[in-house]
Amino acid sequence: MRDGTAPESIRRKGARGDVPVSLVEKIEILVFLSTHADVETSQQALHSLRGWNTQELDQVLSDPSTSPAVIGFVFDRILEEQKDLHQVLEQSAAPSSALGPPANTQKLESGSASSALADSGLAATPSLEAEQASAIGAETDRSKETLLQRMARLTVPQKVRRALVGSQEERLILVRDSNRVVVRSVIQSPKLSDSEIESFAAMRTVQEEVLRLISKNRVFIKNPVVIRALVFNPRSPIDVSLPLIKLLKDRDLKLLTIDKNVPDPVRNSAVRLYLTRTQKR
């Protein structure tokens, strides 16, 4: 089905979500068919996705096997649309009294109150000023809420979305997240810079999964700074560090032989390799 050559009857089943496969595969098929050249097929697939159980969608977005492309599509085209629709419905259902008086009425009332104060010779009382200052202070406190606090309130799908398209500061927070799907999305972000990868490779506060993902990426591992950071990082799994030792320069290799922070197998391997290199000269 993924190559677009599946029979029409199978495509129709897939667009309805009736194919007997796992939940993740069903959603992946629906996402694929949502962009199909056949308009009827794509519309049916989108309709099926929009009517899908939200809890099951969240389950798929939290599954490590779900691709970032599927996550991004479901989040943007389905969950965000549902959120916007709910907001519109809530606003349309709100009683007119809840919206407050018309703006011109508020201005008139405000003007009348100000006029009455002026006529009576009374200025704003200290208590009123205190209330206004308190309100301004509360608003300032909300604006000062840290990015870490805002990120902590996000759901897994929202974190995945921020990991893929968010800022560098957001990725720096999310790469330490306990959810493997979130950290995998950080490493797969198209906005990720070389300096970020170098920083992640040296971090001792990330999951081993992050370091494994970096070591398996052919582009990242071409960077000698990343290689050195992974090998010297005590957090790196031994099976990640050992194959990279042979890629170290002599100076770094010598430093590794006396580094007490790395595991013994890594240090011992560095000693053997360093002796081998020096004996050949």
Image: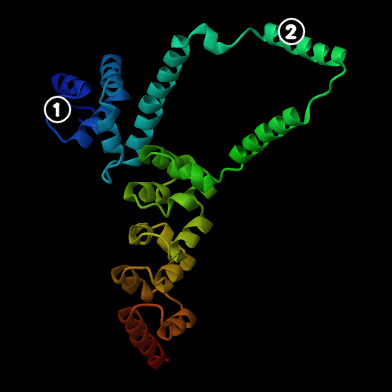
Image location of residue 22, percent across then percent down: 16, 36
In the image, 238: left or right of 231? left
Q: Secondary structure at mark 1?
A: loop
Mark with earlier residue (1, 2): 1
- Please state, as top left, top right, bottom left or bottom right, where the C terminus lies in the image: bottom left
Q: Give percent across and percent down for residue 26.
A: 21, 31
For the residue carrying disc 2, how many other residues have a C-alpha within 10 Å: few (<14), some (14-19), or many (20+)? few
The image quadrant where one finds the N terminus is: top left
Residue 83 seen in this snapshot: yes
**Which label belongs to residue 195?**
none
Q: Quadrant of residue 160?
A: top left
Mark 1 lies on residue: 19
Q: Residue at x 41, y 68 (%)?
A: 230
| Residue 108: mark in rendering | 2
214, above or below 104, in the image: below
Q: Residue visible at 46% across and 60% down? A: 200
Are circles 1 and 2 on residues that touch, CB within 8 Å? no
Residue situated in front as seen by the camera: 34 or 263: 263
Q: Is residue 3 visible?
A: no
CA gap between label 1 and label 2 equals 63 Å
